[in-house]
Amino acid sequence: MQDSHSSAQSPLSRRQLLTSSFAAASLAAISPQLAGAAEMIPGRHAPKFKFSLAAYSYRSLLQGKGDVAPKMDLLGFIDECARMQLDGVELTSYYMPEEPTDAYLIGLRSHCFRQGLAVSGTAIRNDFGHSETVARNRNLDHVRRWIDHAATLHAPMIRIFAGHGQKGNSPEQTHDLMVDGIQKSCDYAAKHGIYLALENHGGVTASADGLLKLVRDVDSPWLGVNLDTGNFRFGGEPYEQMEAVAKYAVNVQVKVVVKDADGKPQPMDFARLKKILTDANYRGFVVLEYEEPGDVPAECRRYVQQMRTDLAL
């Protein structure tokens, strides 16, 4: 806005112009071209990592068994994350009531705020591979409900799955069904400002090529990748696949064990992960999801500290 314009405009017309200019700039910022991975998340000029912990890591404590009640609830988990001096917490939906009320979600949100934690995201179970109408609508409705819940929770991102091919459907039909489900969900998520992060989690998404084929065929700036370091099961060397999808990532989920190209488990190479994320100018949460045996709280504390040390910028 030039000074000569500002002196001549009424307050109302100036406000309208500022609003329209801001809207245009905002639209340009969130409307990346989908032609290549480097263009998927625009405007990232330097890396920045924030650290979080997925509630799934504490599943043995958050889930009851038979008549035995859970040893911890999500409020206790939030307190654990605060003691670890994390930046955020992933409040995985699996450990909430099946249909959480707004009061419940606001309670979690306020507890995070009091503990100085951001909600880095949440995660749901869904499958867009279904062609049968009832099952398909059930999955679409589930994702829409959780977009509403994420907005109430102030979770900026939901981890979603593509799903699995169903008997009788060709690979092409499965792909089209998944793209359609993700597209419809992104269209709804855009209305609430919630990102959907497609996870490399089994089926066609277990390789970078399969994951990116879906991402590139969905036309929405509200879709990104949840880069799970432990979930590439085929398609080549896992770190090369991480590198292929890193510039699409809106969330990074770290496993402490990675299977090599031969399927053999190896300790996570944090130095190599740091280079991949740094080269991609990744800015966002790096979330530990601990799946190994042992004393879970102690192991999570240990690996959180290792992430802080080995991924320090």
Image (tube, grey):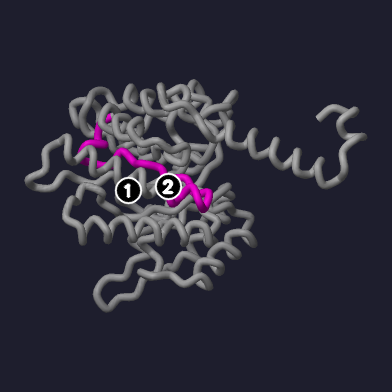
Q: Which disc is residue 240 wearing?
A: none
Q: Is residue 152 left or right of residue 60?
A: right
Residue 262, image x, y percentages: 18, 26
Q: CA distance from mark 1 to mark 2?
A: 33 Å
For label 1, the crowd category at 10 Å Cα-Cα, with few meaning under 14, some 14 to 19 and many 20 or more, is: some
- What's the residue type where badge 1 is placed? Glu
Residue 120, image x, y percentages: 51, 49
Q: Nearer the viewer, mark 1 or mark 2?
A: 2
Residue for badge 1: 291
Residue for badge 2: 187
Which structural element holds mark 1? loop
- What's the residue type where badge 2 is placed? Asp
The segment highlighted magenta reads: 188-207
- As drawn, 147 above or below 172: below
Residue under the image location 86 percent in, 45 percent down: 11
**Can residue 149 be found in the magenta stretch?**
no
